[in-house]
Image (tube, rainbow, N blue to C red):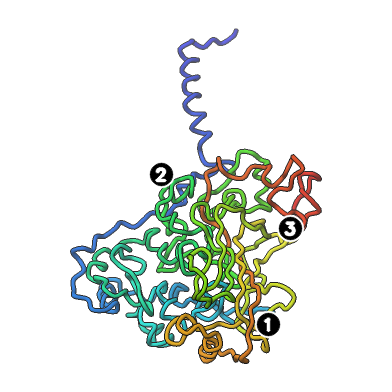
Amino acid sequence: MKMRFPAWLIGLIVIALLIVLPTLYFLPSAEQPQLPAAGIPARAEHVDHADIVKGDFKSGQEVTRACLGCHEDAAAELMRTSHWTWESKPYNVPWREGAVTIGKINQINNFCIGTQGNENKCMSCHAGYGWEAGRAAQQANPENVDCLACHADPGTYGKGLFGNPAEGVDLLAAARSVRATTRENCGKCHFDGGGGNGVKHGDLDESMYFPNQSLDVHMGGKHNLQCSDCHVTRAHQILGRIIANNYTIDPAEQVSCIQCHVGKVHKDERIGTHLAAVACQTCHIPAIAREEPTKVSWDWSKAADASRAEDHYSYLKIKGEFTYESNFAPSYLWFNGNNEYRYLLGDKINPDGPTYINKPAGSITDARAKIFPFKLHKARQPYDKVHQYLLQPVTSGKDGFWTNFDWNQAFELAVPMTGLAYSGEYDFTETHMYWATTHMVQPARDALQCEACHSATGKPGRLDWEALGYPGDPIEWGGRKMP
């Protein structure tokens, strides 16, 4: 005898399945991604300080004393960070005996070259006051911590010489404006590093203050992420470091896409298989300097020519000759998150080609490495012809190069600060420096498509496969990353 179910019961079961099955499908699983927004940390509730802060402040240090009245540990916390020290922990590197430290405080780059002796200008981006007293005295005093640099409304506050507040700043108004950090606070230094808007990074410039979603999918549009949403901060320790001022970086200190993008993030398995060898940034940041141009070359040897017309994007008497580019493809290298080499003061130059300020570490045989986008900055900067090492001049201040336009004097002034002897003979040599490209992330619809790297037309794509260690385009022979 066959059991018959009433029609109303069958209908009820069908309706229940239509409700339950989709719900089960969207439950988190190993095969389904967690919603990225779940990875964003909760933001602290803002406390309006307009009626809390009292005082007639005459100096930045007086503001800090007032801040420490409530935030007792804040200065001590900040003083343990690289935002304060501008110096890495000690490293043992293969080409030097003994441990070395690396950072803006004691090493050079191929932009403005170095901070030593140039603190009156360079420290306008340091989170501290009082550099006129010298490094030892400045770094030891908790009252020199500049709370306003990161927490005041930038419309009320600016920095001047030696990291001190700019002349004319209303310190009480600035202190009453304090808040959690925003892109405007971070951008004052990181968007304008190297002497101007967009100069250094190529993926950070003033267009990122209030970007639309097509410029940066995270910081623009409905998401409106602040820097600290990814660069998570605890006890003033900010997640994320760059290889420009380090040799090796602990992965636990680095910002990663998988902080938010967890699980199976691509429906198409063909894209998913690329993740073993290709960084997210490679496809999702197809161009550098999308709106504002960035500096790609700097020739210091052309400085001091008073006969040339000055233009921010091509020539300045105090700095030399430049080229800028915008909306261009990055350079691509294998990268495992560290440096293979970071030029240290006193290292010999390469007489047969460019001297590398840094070389990202990684290769096709490195299991940790992925193909990653970089901005490459090329420069011609001074070196000592006898000692065969790069020179760091004193550029700003009394008798600096920007005052007297005398290279010999600028190098001699730097000797007691850098500890490097100067022979009296100098010339200029080519240097290369890489900057990892991690911002200006595009919406998925604007990510690179297959043909950008794998050309079906016979024309070469944007990747130099042979330079990356492949015998050719892998799509033509089914190649995979070597074990």
Residue 22 position (above or below residue 416): above
Which residue type does callout 1 highlight?
Answer: Lys
Does residue 88 appear in the picture of this structure? no
Rendering coords of residue 406 (x, y %): 52, 85
Label 2 vs label 1: CA separation? Answer: 50 Å
Residue located 27% across and 72% down the image: 67
Residue located 66% across and 52% down the image: 278
Q: Name the element at disc 3.
A: loop
Residue located 47% across and 49% down the image: 218
Question: Looking at the figure, which quarter contains the C terminus?
Answer: bottom right
Crowdedness near tag 1: few (<14), some (14–19) or many (≥20) residues, C-alpha within 10 Å: some
Q: Nearer the viewer, residue 211 or 74?
A: 211
In the image, taking residue 106 as reference, residue 378 lies left or right, namely right
Residue 413 position (above or below residue 212): below
Location of mark 2 (residue): 222
Rendering coords of residue 214 (x, y %): 48, 45
Q: Mark 2 and 1 residues: CB-CB less than 8 Å, in contact?
A: no
Location of mark 1 (residue): 348
Rendering coords of residue 401 (x, y %): 49, 82
Does residue 150 appear in the picture of this structure? yes
Earlier residue among tags 3 and 2: 2
Earlier residue among tags 1 and 3: 1
Rendering coords of residue 42 (x, y %): 38, 54
Which residue type does callout 3 highlight?
Answer: Leu
Q: Which mark is residue 468?
A: 3
